[in-house]
Amino acid sequence: MKRRFVAAVIIAIAAGNLGCMTLAKQGFKEMRGARGKTLEIHALNRETVAACRSVHVGEIVNEIGDWCPPDMVLGLQQSLPERLAELDEELGGGSPRLYVDLHIQYAQKGGGIRAVLGKDQYLVGRVYLRDDGGARVAELVTVAHSEAISTGDEDMGEAAAEAIADYVRDCRKPLDEDESEDEDD
């Protein structure tokens, strides 16, 4: 985070001196860093998710081999258990359990001069949520994206992991909370 902040400050100062909005926009992208989101493919069984008392990492599969940078996979392998452990603390632990499987299906590496020229970074994966018995209760797509030059491959994995944990956390909210949030938008 400190690295992003310093990069953003330098770019913002340069933008102010040069009067260049392109540099100011890049400074904003540096501050924002990698972001992730999830999209539902198949309807979620809310009752199963609401009843779960713990969430665990199932399998993380790289379906595209060398096309996915090893550090993106490593970022997921490190960050997903951490994010789900935070959820476990909120849920209290125990049974029934929810398992998260992630299959990496696309990765695009940015960084360096390619990022300056507009080369975005992406990490896309199919996520399966399973109950204790192995039955799928939801199928999602997670997308991590960054236009920041300073975003590393590990940051992309972390953004995807955070999006998955946020999705499970949001699914545990009562239905009436979701509806009132939609009305506020």
Image (tube, rainbow, N blue to C red):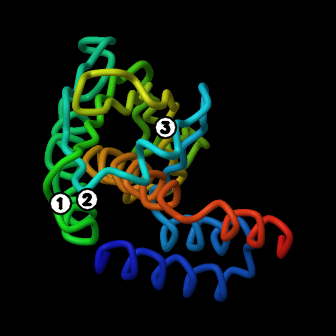
Q: Nearer the viewer, residue 150 or 76?
A: 76
Q: Nearer the viewer, residue 141 or 27?
A: 141
Residue behind mark 1: 85
Residue behind mark 3: 142
Dot 1: few (<14), some (14–19), or many (≥20) neighbours within 10 Å? some
For the residues bearing labels 3 and 2, Cβ distance under 8 angstroms: no
From this view, report whether residue 7 is shown above or below residue 16.
above
Q: Position of residue 175 (x, y in %)?
A: 65, 60
Q: Position of residue 137 (x, y in %)?
A: 44, 30
Mark positioned earlier in the residue sequence (3 or 2): 2
**Label 3 residue SS:** strand
Q: Which label was assigned to residue 83?
A: 2
Distance between mark 2 and mark 1 Cα atoms:
5 Å
Dot 3: few (<14), some (14–19), or many (≥20) neighbours within 10 Å? many
From this view, report whether residue 112 is shown above or below residue 25.
above
Q: Measuring 27% from the left and 66% from the top, which residue is drawn there?
A: 91
Distance between mark 3 and mark 1 Cα atoms:
19 Å
Q: Measuring 41% from the left and 42% from the top, which residue is drawn there?
A: 48
**Label 1 residue SS:** helix
Q: State which quarter of the image contains the C terminus.
A: bottom right
From this view, report whether residue 164 is shown above or below residue 122.
below
Q: Position of residue 148 (x, y in %)?
A: 49, 57
Q: Nearer the viewer, residue 119 or 85?
A: 85
For the residues bearing labels 2 and 1, Cβ distance under 8 angstroms: yes
Distance between mark 3 and mark 2 Cα atoms:
15 Å
Dot 2: few (<14), some (14–19), or many (≥20) neighbours within 10 Å? many
